[in-house]
Image (cartoon, grey):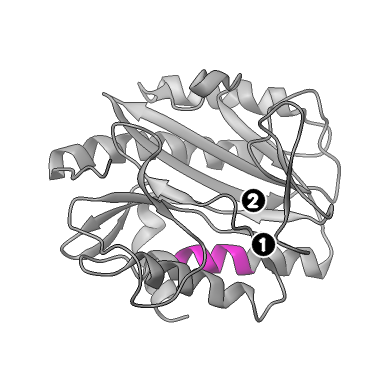
Amino acid sequence: MITIKSSKDFEKMAIAGEAVASVLDAVKEAATAGVRMKELDALAAEIIHAHRCLPSFLGYHGFPAHICTSPNDVIVHGIPDGYPLREGDILSIDAGAIYEGWHADAAVTFPIGRVPAEVEKLLAVTERALWAGIAEVRPGARLGDIGHAVEELARPAGLGVVQEYVGHGIGREMHEEPQVPNYGQPGTGMRLRKGMAICIEPMFNLGGEGTRLESDNWTVRTADGTWSAHFEHTVAVTSKGPRVLTAGDRAEDLVEAGERR
């Protein structure tokens, strides 16, 4: 079901978004070689509760942690465990928070120390694609406009665009309609309406687009073992264009950068 939010609803989602942004910043700073995934999850739990929020992920269909930690060839939904980060890894952190019943959700991927040039490019292109997609958000725009803006950055770079997992609507539920693919044709798909909120989340691979689900029924890896990057923001559709609810004070400048791509 697609839900339309009021400005007051968006303000509550923005408070949840502030918690998510704080989690991502703190975890990124703490994630150094030798740190274990479950330590990062404990840090995230502290921050979410310090912001007077609840975790979106903990208990969601049985998910056992506060955040998803997805290293290297893990695309999404990695469960925090005892794995110690190593120099040269990359790590995706996906976090969600709830304030007075309203959700926000975002993700970032970053290197642990130095990584090869092709991995730096993977991270940079995936993040630019997120902001290119966000720049398309306005009332009357179509989902295909967003997907096309995301996809057209991946293809020239030779990156695989994950198609089995996509973005989504968000609000009272973490996952609402519509689905928001990272591929598409301009002028196609559902039209956006003022008051909608969506999560745009490119997932690009160094190799092919194929995925493989682990036996835990959560962890999703690349089918060919190549590394993957994932970036995400929660975006409100307003009469003035996109309002990014999970990026703090950086949002306006980054949206403008996406428009100039």
- Region of the chain picked out in magenta, as a range: 125-131
Q: Does the magenta stretch include residue 128?
A: yes
Q: Residue 10 carries which label?
A: none
Number of numbered callouts drawn: 2
248 horizontally vs 119: left or right: left
Residue at mark 1: 123
Asked if residue 46 can be seen in this view, the reply is no
User: Which residue: 40% across, 58% down?
Assistant: 250
Nearer to me, 214 or 21 = 214
Q: Could you say which disc has been placed on residue 109 in the image?
A: 2
The three-letter code of the residue at mark 2 reads Thr
Report x, y in % for residue 14: 30, 41
Query: Where residue 210 appears, x then y in whole percent?
Result: 72, 56
Dominant secondary structure (helix, strand or loop) of the stretch shown in magenta: helix
Pick the residue in front: 5 or 182. Answer: 182
Residue 78 coordinates in the image, percent (x, y)? 68, 34
Query: Which quarter of the image is occupied by the N terminus?
Result: top left
Q: Is mark 1 on a helix, strand or loop?
A: helix
Dot placed on the residue nearer the N-terminal end, 2 or 1: 2
Q: Is residue 111 left or right of residue 12?
A: right
Characterize the local packing of mark 2: few (<14), some (14-19) or many (20 or more) Cα atoms within 10 angstroms.
Answer: many
The answer to whether residue 148 is above or below residue 162 is: below
Q: Which amino acid does label 1 sit on?
A: Leu
- Taking the magenta stretch, the answer to whether it contains residue 249 is no
Which residue is painted at 34% across and 32% down in the image? 173
Q: Are marks 2 and 1 in contact (CB under 8 Å)?
A: yes
Q: In this view, does 37 lie to the left or right of 182?
A: right
